[in-house]
Amino acid sequence: MKPAVVVVGSFNQDLTWRCAEFPAPGETIVGEFKTGPGGKGSNQAVAAARAGAPTAFVGAFGDDSFGRDAQAFLRAEGITVHAARKKLPTGNAAILVNHRGQNQIVVALGANAALAPRDVPSTLLRSARVVVCQHETNLPLNAAVLRTARRAGVTTVLNPAPMRADFDARILAHTDVLIPNESEFVALIARPGFDEAALHALAPAALHSLCRSLGAPTVIVTLGARGCFVSEPSRHTFIPSYTGLKVIDTTGAGDAFVGGFAAGLVKFSGDQVAAAHFANAVAALSVTKFGTAPSMPARRTIDQFIRKHSHVARRPSA
Ligand code: RIB
């Protein structure tokens, strides 16, 4: 089947240590180790595919076992893989997860940073319904990818994670939907004194107006345990998160949301609020399991979860 969602992005081998508390600088602690497939782009592709969208992933890998295993994993998920082989190690990430499910991450981009426009088939971009990029490859490549897709009438989604010093806001001219988390939103607004606490204190109308100032037609701010805020040109909607879930590991929750949103756009024929509700459920389910890509829920699980929690009603804030 022709891929409806195309994710151009990173793969990282996640090397994860679970610990009671994060170590202080200079401290050594004992933890438990696991490794598995990760990387924001790959996680988003897995989330979209498991959520039911025919999905392609375009990424760069080293000629090493992490890279080979990654491609086999993605293909086994039913994802169409366009792999560029680079003379660099496959990306990897050192992740610490504490007993509250919070994380700290250091990423070595490796091959991801060398992904180039010639590695991305333009026919694949033009024939998609949704194209998704994040910040773990290289940013000029993202701009070229989103420009090509948008000119072909494809919905473009940019997840500016992690925020980078070389971010060029001109990419927003090629972005239909911008999905930052709280810290990325604060960095995008870049106003003295505007921090996450100030963001949380904003009334919905004021947050909507800040979102409008960024220039992307739709801005969705993911607010962690609070939920998410969808700012479209003529309305804004707050979607609360699900409560009462046992949080095991929040790593990759943002990726679950972005991949779930892309799949939701396909499922709900471009209805962004419906897609955000769907994404909210995908993200909620992902934190109840350990790991990143392996924690992405299947379509059936998502549908059952949404039916069970149908009391989490839509709450328009305008
Ligand atoms: O968003 C989670 C991801 O961030 C991890 O899988 C890790 O690889 C880093 O890219």
Image (cartoon, rainbow, N blue to C red):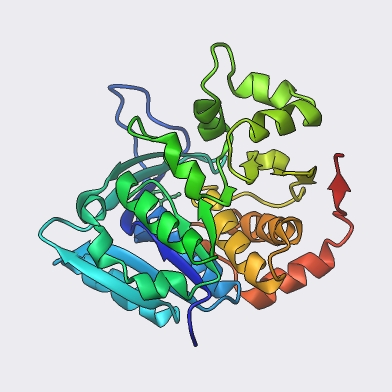
Quadrant in the picture for the C terminus: top right
Q: Position of residue 115 (x, y in %)?
A: 25, 57
Instruction: Point out the residue furthest to the bottom here.
Output: 1
226 to the left or right of 3: right
Name the residue at 85% across, 39% down: 317
Residue 132's place in the image compared with 52, above or below, is above
Q: Position of residue 219 (x, y in %)?
A: 63, 43
Q: Nearer the viewer, residue 29 or 82?
A: 82
Residue 72's place in the image compared with 152, above or below, is below
Q: Position of residue 143 (x, y in %)?
A: 38, 49
Name the residue at 58% across, 43% down: 216
Residue 22 occupies quadrant: top left
Query: What is the number of callouts on the image?
Result: 0
Q: Nearer the viewer, residue 199 or 142?
A: 142
Residue 270's place in the image compared with 3, above or below, is above
Instruction: Point out the residue furthest to the front here.
Output: 151
Residue 163's place in the image compared with 117, above or below, is above
Residue 292 in sight here:
no
Name the residue at 37% across, 44% down: 95
Residue 185 occupies quadrant: top right
Q: Nearer the viewer, residue 3 or 43?
A: 3
Q: Position of residue 112 (x, y in %)?
A: 26, 54
Q: Nearer the viewer, residue 244 or 87?
A: 87
Instruction: Point out the residue furthest to the left here.
Output: 87
Name the residue at 52% across, 79% down: 54
315 to the left or right of 63: right
Residue 300 in sight here:
yes
